[in-house]
Image: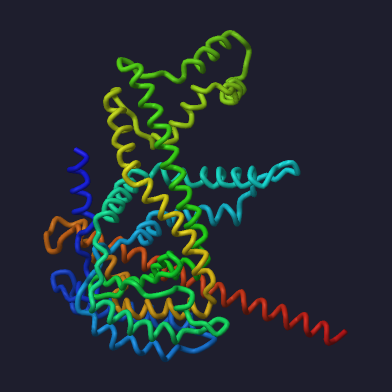
Amino acid sequence: MKKIICVTLIGIQFANAMNLAVLRKNSELYSVEKATASSEEVKLQIQSLRKKLFSSSGNYSSLQDLAKIKTDVKSDNAMNLLSFSSLIKGELKLTADRISSMEKYQAPVLITSTASVEKLRIDKRNYESEVCNVDMNRTAEGLSIKLLTMAIDSKNKANEINSQSMDLGNKLLEVIRKAPTFQGKDLTHLFGDLKKVEIFDGIIRELHFSRADLTVEISLPMLITLRTGMDNYYLKALNCLLDYFKEQEFLFQKKLDFMGNSPNSVVNFMLEYDKIAKASQGQSINKEDLKEKLNSLDIPELTYNKRIKKFYEGKKFSSLSEEKSFLSLRLDRIRGFIGYLESKVKNSEKVHQRISKMTKEQQNYLIDLFIQLQGENIMSSIDKEVIINELKSNKTTIDKNSLNVTFAYQTLISDQIASLSQFLDNEKNQESLTLKDRNILMQIKANN
């Protein structure tokens, strides 16, 4: 059964995606007017964003070099449109937003004078995990499937580099070297040597650099989350995801061990709880007080039962065998990807430390580079409506798996571009207010 699942998953995950610029030429989906309006909407969106990126410095003329590079793209070498980074940013967006809001608006973790630094770190991590688990319970099933597929792919994927993609990569390096420098050093000093160019559907999607045994995969989603300050929250959400599956693995294995000792009956971990509740019958005691008292008792079985219930993700079982099947399947999946996920978390933290050294101007330059590489392959409101209608229909105009992959990736790109645009507006407004405050203070100082 497990082998069948893995094969099926890979078939779904690696469905061919579609270039939106090409999709708009499909007359069964788009009228001429719709296709034109969609392209115009994207062009205006790109123009507006580029203007915001370079409002204080003007456009970088060197990026005009990309026109020739884009026309030279002739073949694809990427196995999968959704890289690990893209998958995580798509799946953990809501969780990252929750953690961001929690830090900004909720009461912080209580700090006492006797608390150690390590305890504070653990308390903060647990606090964040409680926030994360709201989403993990909802998405863990689908994420466990996707992570297993990517873990299998990482073992089987041939890391071949064709000469065509590296030729394009070398041309792109010349453009990257024209980015603003920091302390006289260009971006290649920070990233290292170009090792791979990921091309998908005629679009240069990622550039992989390597230095000191660390590979940095530069992509548009990665650059935008860095520029908007959300990268740190995605890292926290990623750590929450790892914690969730590691604890689930531990608890599910323990539950299976208990079930093995009592194969003919469901183990009742609420036994001690029920004994205390019955002993309290006849006494004049408030039900809420009783509940609070029971929940505060340090009973191993009771504590375990409360912990494991959080990881059942709302599932109910009609039999012991059904419950065992769920536990065993999830354990098999977790053990198939947990090493891969741990490695990705560690790598993501190291990459964050390195790319955070880029200046704001360098980030803007690279974002502009990747936006231009995307060209019109960005989803407009018209594209979104057309794709959703097609996915809902019973027609077989276009392969639904391919369209689903396209929609997932393009939704991520569209959401992030919208977030970046709003962030740049807020940043400009804040800079304007700061300038006004500075001028007022200088005027007051001059008058005195």
Percent of width and height locating residue 318:
29, 24
Residue 34 visible in the displayed image: no
The answer to whether 25 appears left or right of 248 in the picture is left
As rendered, which of 190 and 267 lies closer to the eye? 190
Residue farthest along the left direction in this orientation: 396
As rendered, which of 292 and 262 lies closer to the eye? 262
Residue 379 visible in the displayed image: yes
As rendered, which of 292 and 160 lies closer to the eye? 160
Q: Quadrant of residue 405?
A: bottom left
Residue farthest along the right direction in this orientation: 448
Display coloring: rainbow
Q: Which residue appears at 46% of the width and 84% of the height?
A: 179
Residue farthest along the front direction in this orientation: 212
The answer to whether 424 appears left or right of 19 in the picture is right
Q: Count the marks.
A: 0
Q: Is 411 situated above or below 96?
A: below
Q: Which residue appears at 56% of the width and 25% of the height?
A: 295
Residue farthest along the bottom direction in this orientation: 61
